[in-house]
Amino acid sequence: MSTTIFAPAERPGFAESSFIARVREAMQDTATVTWRDMVRTARQPEMLTFAVVMGVFFLLLFNYVFGGAIGAGTGVDYITFLVPGVLVITALQGAQQTSLGLAADLAEGVADRFRSLPMNQGAVIAGRTVADAARNLAGLILLAMVAMVMGFRFGSLVGGIAAIGLTLAVGFAFSWLGAAIAAKVRNQEMVGMLSMFWLFPLMLASSAFAPPESMPGWLQGFATHQPISVAADAVRSLTSGDPAGGDVLYALAWVVGMLVVFIPLSSRLYRNPG
Amino acid sequence: MRTVVIEADHLRKSYGDTIAVNDLSFTVTAGEVVGLLGPNGAGKTSTINMLTTLLPIDGGSARVGGCDVATRPRAVRSQIGLAGQTAAADEMLTARENLKLFGRLYKIPKSELLALVDEIIERFRMSDYADRPVSTLSGGQRRRLDIVAALVSNPPALFLDEPTTGLDPRTRNELWETIEDLAAGGTAVVLTTQYLEEADRLADHIVMIDGGRVVARGTPRQLKAQLKRDVLEVHLVSGSDLEGALALIGDMPEVAADRATNELHVPIGDGAGTSLQILRRLDDAGIKIADFQLRRPTLDDVFLTLTGPAAAKGGSE
Ligand SMILES: Nc1ncnc2c1ncn2[C@@H]1O[C@H](COP(=O)(O)OP(=O)(O)OP(=O)(O)O)[C@@H](O)[C@H]1O
Ligand SMILES: [Mg+2]
């Protein structure tokens, strides 16, 4: 057969580049994909509206309907207990959107285009999680404003900012879980169903709406230490203005742990679902 | 010698029990257009997807620009443009935004990108709908965007899987000219198509596959000549000459006469030589000829003869 003599064109990315260059490329590609996903978010504002409306719905429902019954056990004004939980739940719904969005990419065929491009493949997911975090930030701020109208108060400005920041970090970690599910399952309807499967038990068997002490013993252990409860407790101590400590570290440990597991896992599944 | 840009070397792909690509080899040099032809399910898309890193290679190997597709996918991706068989643009972005997105991911410098995208939109007459979301575009408009997206980075190796399916004749012609221009500029092109006219016009070299195997290869002219199915059609002035003419050239196999139109159909293997002999014989005998033509087989004839159930039965090649 003929021998191949092809002068390597000086094309970007032709040569296997250094580690530093690859990291820079990953960041650049993530920024590009983030831009793309934010444009998409802006074109479907109902996703943001939906997240906020759900949050408001939870606030109203739990505060006015169950508040009397549940609030008695919390020892504080129930709205003070409830708002951090609802903030965390709202961030998790953003993570659900990551799952659905990635599944839609894979269905639309634009994922095939990405796979044929000289880009960092992990950026497809990373960009989406960052864009979803940005949308989450907007949703959380809107929701916090509604909560304040309902009588909720942040203990301090710094505490409030830290609380929103921690909530975002938790949502970001769950976004990668959602991405891993979408990358594995791919089928859009299945992804939609599966995200209900993890969200609902985690949401209800948690300290988001009521203290776990009121739950049966066998559930308490799970309900106290699972990430949503830990996050809700940490956000609570940040919003109350108390000097926060252990529970914030615990929540951050969950965030880091989930990222360590789900970033490589979702990237691998995205490249090879098998 | 021209440099080899794309090299498929005994490629194999199977899905479970289905062998989609079976021992397929071909090369494409700079400036060459190779047409992959074959019926539905022949393995064209599987081949393109393996060469463009989208599909793992089960056997054999492939190189683009000297880089092995399996071991250096990243280097391969920086040298290819792909317009796959299925649409691959972001539905919610506009056509212009899609081109910007892909251009950025190709690492085209920001300072050049905007002007480049404008120029491309202008050149491919997409201005009317460039700023509408892709989901609102017609099938042909989307197809055009898909193909143009493959050209943004001016890649040395271009893969087009049924590029003109669904395009109107004018757009198709423009695309053909574009492909010819790109090839003239040194781009290596692999093209699959169902339009044999397209392969005839564009392809320097055709690889005809069926059931994942090569059934014929060569230039379009070689493939047609290989069929040996030229037909000489002679239209006589008078029907009364028909019998005499048949007697004169009765030694040719499978001569047919059409009494309604006074026509003779003489299959003559190949070449103009035999036709001249036949015409001279008729003329020498004083038979008046109103008209004649030499009908060459089309690529359709080649395709139908060499692929599909008929070919499998005949056990060609
Ligand atoms: N993902 C898959 N799983 C199982 N079989 C597949 C898959 N993709 C393709 N095939 C099979 O492999 C064979 C080759 O398919 P391929 O798509 O490469 O054909 P093609 O030549 O591109 O056909 P067409 O002209 O219809 O586009 C077919 O028999 C097809 O059914
Ligand atoms: Mg195909």
Image: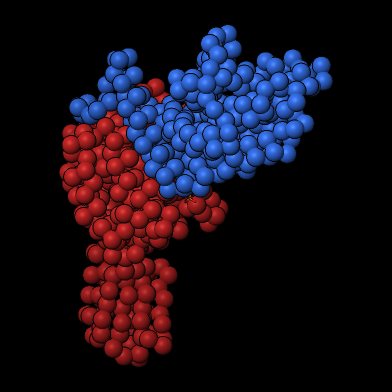
- At 53% from the left and 17% from the top, the residue drawn is A241
Q: Is residue B209 left or right of residue B30?
A: right
Specify the quadrant of the image occupied by residue A88.
top right
- At 50% from the left and 52% from the top, the residue drawn is B40
The figure's colour scheme reads: by chain
- At 63% from the left and 30% from the top, the residue drawn is A79
Label the red chain with its letter: B
Specify the quadrant of the image occupied by residue B52.
top left
Q: Position of residue B169 (x, y in %)?
A: 32, 65
* Closer to us: B201 or A83: A83
Q: Can residue B60 be seen?
A: no
Q: Position of residue B55 (x, y in %)?
A: 47, 34
- Up the image or down, B145 lies above or below A24; here it is below
Q: Is residue B42 left or right of residue B176?
A: right
* Closer to us: B23 or B229: B23
Q: Which residue, as the protein is rendered here, is positioned at the far top?
A: A246
Write down the colour of chain A: blue
Q: Assign the N terminus of chain B to one quadrant of the image.
A: top left
Q: Position of residue A130 (x, y in %)?
A: 43, 29
Q: How many marks?
A: 0
